[in-house]
Amino acid sequence: MKITTKLWIGLAVLVVLSPLGLIIPDHFKAGSAWGEWGGDEIKALVGYVPQGLEKLAGLWNAPIPDYAFKGWEAKGLPQLSLAYVISAIVGILFIVLTVILVGKLLVKKGG
């Protein structure tokens, strides 16, 4: 089996496992997944929002916020798990296309 095939299989496994970040905290009633807190959640946890986070919070808006589509937040765990998988696939496709594009640009400049 080629190394690229093994890498694609590994990525596919990670895509399928991606909803665990949603399922495990829900199962243990732990709230959000560790490290995925917004400013409001950090304030609730520690009592304040660090100045740097507060200042930069609006700088970046995720293309798929909370790994879910608009209106899916209240649909339940199965739909949110599907949204996690779709988000993972979209992210992988974006990275692969970017790497291919940069690779082609570099080959044209070098040749």
Image: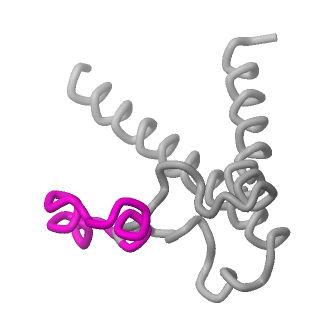
Quadrant in which the N terminus is drawn: top right
Q: Is residue 95 above or below residue 105?
A: below
Q: How is the image coloured?
A: one colour
Q: Hey, which residue is sitting farthest front in the picture? A: 47
Q: Nearer the viewer, residue 51 or 97?
A: 51
Q: Residue at x 74, y 53 (%)?
A: 19
Q: Position of residue 106 (x, y in %)?
A: 28, 28
64 vs 60, left or right, is right
User: Is 54 colored magenta in this rendering?
Assistant: yes
Q: Nearer the viewer, residue 2 or 80?
A: 80
User: Is 76 colored magenta in this rendering?
Assistant: no
5 vs 97, left or right, is right
Which of the 4 image quarters holds residue 4? Answer: top right
Which of the 4 image quarters holds residue 2? Answer: top right
Q: Residue at x 24, y 72 (%)?
A: 58
Q: Is residue 63 above or below residue 4?
A: below
Q: Residue at x 26, y 65 (%)?
A: 49
Q: Position of residue 104 (x, y in %)?
A: 37, 34
26 vs 69, left or right, is right
Q: Residue at x 77, y 43 (%)?
A: 17
Q: Hey, which residue is sitting farthest bottom in the picture? A: 71
Q: Which residues lie in the magenta part?
A: 40-61
Which of the 4 image quarters holds residue 7? Answer: top right
Number of marks in the image?
A: 0
Q: Position of residue 100 (x, y in %)?
A: 45, 37
Q: Position of residue 110 (x, y in %)?
A: 23, 20
Quadrant in which the C terminus is drawn: top left
